[in-house]
């Protein structure tokens, strides 16, 4: 006779949760490269947020839920006058830094933007710093923020190395929620049990579907999804800090856990074969690898798989700009991930649709020699029908080597090549770019341009003297690390 009851023996916390918790609570970061890269990541992320404030579709989401709400020691949203509770502040900061698809990127089996976690980190650190000062205690300093960034990057990035959430239809912001929950809980003073509880709630939470990133449903939710995830992370960390019990087997529980419900190749009601059982693979220990190898978007506000295609197109622009009506076809040679995520034909319905279209992001710089956030707007697209005319002439083909080297740990290339063929039988050379300027292999030429990008973004919001004050502070690693979070954020208040 078969059993008709569950054996109610509460398990220990899943191993993955314990590894994350022990890393966040105990690991000491000793990589000078990681600290320096985190500083550059901070300024780039904040700059992307400031630039986004120029777009009403972004700013309409910002501010308190209840108009006129006053929050004691409220966290500030850079570039605005808002002082919000840390949950809504995390939403707003996360929204602005992600809006233009211009902040850093991590590419592996899963993709994502680890600097999205800054929404939760800065909101919690700013709020708690002000509260500490009011209580006569020492505030957090910016080194605490940089440490949290390195750890959040590491959690999100290592989980992404061999675990493809996109292949089961889940959006990568689940990793923002998990990473932000861990570092927010640490900033709040979590012990190990509280940390584990918070992490378990992040995994058991409802997870976002990827449909808003793909044809035919691509839309602006992808620009605020990370803010939503980081905001939820702050709320879950707060719940755990209030003593809420955790869910120890959240990942591994048969039938009801994350693996069986959301991470299996087959329907949860079907019996899984051994090779179809899914669980997370952690190919390396948590350290500072991800921050050291992070990809910066320096030249183009574009989905990262198209960065090298846009760079190749800019190179070809002088050869084709006066021959646009003579073009017969354009061949884009790329890697499998780009084809799966951003290769699309047909009408592009909105800016979010366009900045996730490989063909659009190649056509614009071929025609105009540049690619900016304004190039995705309806007014620009509708005024230049030549863009869609060129899109219709494009062929996208996979190069197996590009696909293979995209995943090789020692390379992590994001290669694209573009070649233009004319009606008279002539053609341009094939221009191939295998590593974008924001890649670790191009740091020496990339960082000065990253700093120029930050300066330019500062000027969109602040007067010259304030821009110089901020830039000078952010260039000085030692000085930046020692300044209080509340003082630092105050520099970004208008």
Image: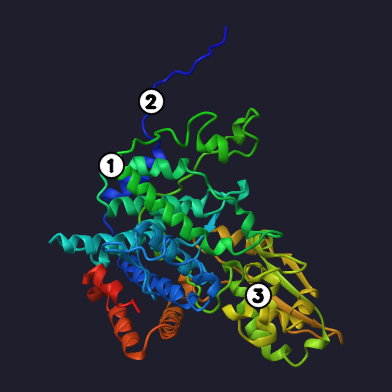
Q: Which circle's residue, 3 or 2, is located before the other in the chain?
A: 2
Horizontal arrangement in the rendering, residue 336 relative to residue 293 (left or right): right
471 relative to 225, above or below: below
Q: Disc 1 designates what residue?
A: 192
* Distance CA(mark 1)–CA(mark 3): 46 Å
Coordinates of residue 251 in the picture (x, y in percent): 47, 37
* Distance CA(mark 3)–CA(mark 2): 52 Å
Quarter of the image with the N terminus is: top right
User: Which residue occupies the extreme bottom position in the image?
Assistant: 322
Coordinates of residue 337 in the picture (x, y in percent): 63, 60
Quarter of the image with the C terminus is: bottom left
Q: Secondary structure at mark 3?
A: helix
Q: Disc 3 designates what residue?
A: 361
Coordinates of residue 4 in the picture (x, y in percent): 53, 13
Horizontal arrangement in the rendering, residue 212 relative to residue 38 (left or right): right
* Distance CA(mark 2)–CA(mark 1): 18 Å
Q: Disc 2 designates what residue?
A: 10
Residue at x-position 39% and y-position 21%: 9
């Amino acid at each position: 006779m078969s059993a008709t009851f569950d054996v109610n023996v509460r398990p220990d916390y899943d191993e993955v949760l314990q590894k994350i918790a022990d890393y966040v609570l105990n690991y000491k970061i000793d990589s000078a490269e990681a600290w320096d890269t985190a500083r550059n990541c901070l300024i780039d992320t904040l700059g992307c947020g400031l630039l986004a404030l120029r777009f009403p579709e972004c700013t309409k989401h910002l501010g308190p839920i209840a108009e006129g709400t006053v929050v004691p020691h409220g966290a500030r949203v850079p570039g605005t006058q808002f002082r919000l509770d840390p949950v809504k502040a995390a939403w707003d900061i996360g929204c602005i830094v992600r809006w233009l698809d211009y902040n850093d990127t991590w590419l592996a089996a899963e993709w994502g933007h680890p600097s999205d976690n800054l929404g939760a980190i800065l909101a919690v650190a700013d709020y708690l710093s002000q509260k500490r000062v009011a209580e006569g205690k020492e505030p957090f300093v910016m080194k605490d923020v940089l440490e949290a960034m390195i750890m959040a990057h590491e959690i999100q990035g290592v989980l992404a190395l061999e675990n493809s959430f996109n292949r089961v239809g889940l959006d990568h912001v689940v990793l923002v929620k998990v990473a932000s929950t861990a570092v927010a809980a640490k900033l709040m003073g979590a012990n190990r049990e509280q940390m584990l509880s918070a992490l378990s709630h992040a995994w058991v939470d409802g997870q976002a579907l990827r449909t808003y990133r793909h044809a035919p449903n691509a839309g602006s939710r992808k620009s605020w999804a990370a803010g939503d995830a980081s905001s939820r992370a702050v709320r879950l960390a707060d719940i755990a800090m209030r003593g809420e019990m955790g869910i120890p087997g959240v990942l591994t529980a048969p039938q009801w856990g994350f693996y069986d419900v959301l991470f299996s190749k087959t329907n949860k009601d079907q019996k899984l074969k051994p090779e179809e059982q899914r669980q997370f693979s952690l190919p390396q220990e948590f350290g500072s690898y991800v921050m050291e190898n992070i990809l910066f978007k320096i030249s183009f506000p574009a989905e990262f798989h198209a960065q090298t295609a846009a760079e190749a197109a800019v190179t070809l622009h002088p050869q084709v700009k006066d021959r646009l009506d003579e073009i017969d076809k354009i061949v884009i040679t790329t890697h499998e991930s780009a084809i799966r995520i951003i290769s699309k034909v047909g009408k592009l319905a909105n800016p979010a649709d366009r900045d996730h279209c490989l063909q659009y992001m190649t056509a614009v710089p071929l025609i105009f020699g540049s690619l900016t956030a304004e190039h995705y707007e309806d007014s620009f697209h509708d005024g230049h029908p030549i863009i869609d005319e060129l899109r219709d002439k494009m062929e996208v083909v996979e190069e197996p080597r590009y696909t293979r080297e995209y995943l090789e740990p020692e390379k992590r290339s994001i290669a694209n090549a573009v070649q233009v063929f004319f009606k008279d039988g002539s053609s341009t050379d094939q221009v191939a770019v295998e590593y974008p300027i924001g890649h670790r292999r191009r740091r020496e030429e990339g960082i000065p341009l990253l700093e120029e990008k930050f300066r330019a973004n500062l000027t969109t919001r602040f007067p010259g003297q304030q821009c110089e004050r901020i830039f000078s502070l952010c260039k000085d690693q030692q000085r930046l690390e020692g300044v209080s979070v509340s003082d630092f954020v105050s520099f970004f208040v208008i």
